[in-house]
Image (cartoon, helix red, strand yellow):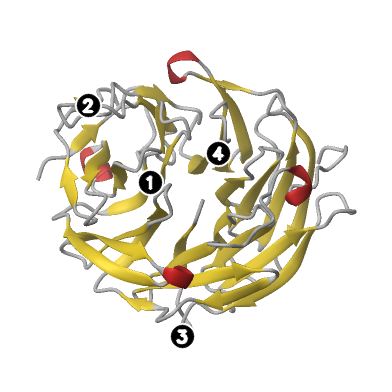
Amino acid sequence: MSVWALCWTTGCAGFFVYPGTATGGTGSTANDYVYVANSTTQTLAGFSVGTATLTAVTNSPYALTFIPTAVAVNPADTMVFVAGSNGLTGFINAYSIGTGGALTLLMSNNVAAAGEVSIDVSPDGNWLLGLDSNGPSLNEAIVDVYEINTGTGQLSLGTAGGYTYTGSSIPVIVPKAIKFAPNGDYVFAAVGTAGDLVFPFTTTVSNGAPLGTALALNFGTSSSVSDNALAVNSNSSYLYIARSGTSGGLAVYAIGSGGSLTPVTGSPFAAGTNPISVAVNTTATLAYVANQSDNTISAYSLGSSGTVTSAAIFTATTTAAARAIAVDKSGDYLLAAANGGYPDLAMYSYDSTTSGKLDFSTSIPTGTDPTNPVALAVTH
C-alpha cells in the first residue's frame, strides 16, 4: 500500500469576550451533532445538541469492529469518518448523517497497515488525510492521502510522494494531530516532541498528489516539549497549538506566506497540566485548551492580532482527564470528552458576566462505562 512518507530534518487581565450568539454564534442547534469515538467499547456514539441538552441519536452507540483512534465530519455535514485498527489491519469507516443525526454505514474502508491517529477532511470535501502511527518506527512522519468518493464514502489512496529526513539531533517523532486550514491552502501536522510540519495543499489535482513539499518547524528544544493538538481560526490566519512540557500552554502563531509561522507576542500562554486538546470558536474571539492531567480547561480571550487578552482556568468538575474538546455548530457550547470520566461527555455554556467562566450545562454517558472516549467531532 502506498503512503505519503513525510520525514523531516530539521494569567492575563482584561475583558473576556462572550463567544456565543452575541459575537457570532449561529444560536441555532438545528443539525447540531457531536460524535464520540470510544476505545474500550469499540463504539461510535452520536448526540444531538439542543438548548442545554444532549440527546443520543437513533441507534447510538454504533458498534465498530476495531479500536477507534480518530473521528472527523466532512464540511458539508453529510458524512462521519472514524479511523482505527484491530491490531493487524487499519480501517476508516464512512457513515452518512441522516435525520436527527442518525448514522448509516456507507463503507468500511480497509486501509491495510495504516494506523491513523488523527484524520481531517479537506474544505472541499474531496480528500481525507490521516497521520499514521507507523511513522516513528521509521523516524518518519507519515501522512496518508485518500480521495473521497462523496457518494459512496469509498476512499482511494493517492499517489505516493516524500520528504526525507537526515540527521540525529531532532527529538523523536510522535504523531499527534493533523489539521486543514479552513481556506484549504495548508495542512498542519503536530508530531509531538519533534514539533510540527506545514504542507502546501492544492485541491485541484490530476495526479492524486495534493500535498506539496513540507516545511519542517521544530518549536521544542528537547524531548520535554510536545505539540499535541492543533486548531486554525476561521480565516486561516492563526494556528493554535496545545503544547505540554517545558514552556507549555497555548502556543499561537501567525500564518504567513508559504505557511511560515511567527509566534505572537507572549506565546505560549500558560495553561494547566499536560495540555492535550485545543479548540477555537468560529469568530476567533476565544480559544480553549483541555489539560489532561489536572482536570481543568483553560479559556483565552483573543484579540484581532491573535494576542491573548485575558485568560482563566476552571475545573471541569464533571469530567476527569479531558481528552478532546470542540465548539458546537451553534457556537454556544463547548463539548468535552473525558477518558476515564463519567459521564463521559460534558457540555458547557459561556458565562456572559464573569471573566473566563464556563457554566456547566449538561452531561451524558457515551455508552456503558468504561467507554474511554479518545476523540470527538462536531458538525460545522
Mark 3 → mark 2, Cα distance in angstroms: 45 Å
Is label 1 in a helix, a strand or a loop? strand
Q: Secondary structure at mark 3?
A: loop
Instruction: Please tell me in which quadrant of the rendered image residue 296 appears.
Output: bottom right
Hey, which quadrant is residue 208 in on the image? top left
- Earlier along the polypeptide chain: callout 4 or callout 1? 1
Task: Tell me which label, 3 or 1, sits earlier in the chain.
Answer: 1
Q: Is residue 226 left or right of residue 288?
A: left
Identify the residue shown where x is 46% and y is 30%.
183
Disc 1 marks which residue?
A: 120
Q: Which residue is mark 3?
A: 368
Measured from the top left, where is residue 90 in percent x and y?
Answer: 20, 59
Q: CA distance from mark 4 to mark 2?
A: 29 Å
Front tag of 4 and 2: 2
Residue 349 location (% of width, % of height): 73, 61
Residue at coordinates 66% horizontally, 51% vertically from top-left? 26
Q: Are marks 4 and 2 in contact (CB under 8 Å)?
A: no
Q: Nearer the viewer, residue 189 or 329?
A: 329
Say which of marks 3 and 1 sits in front. Answer: 1
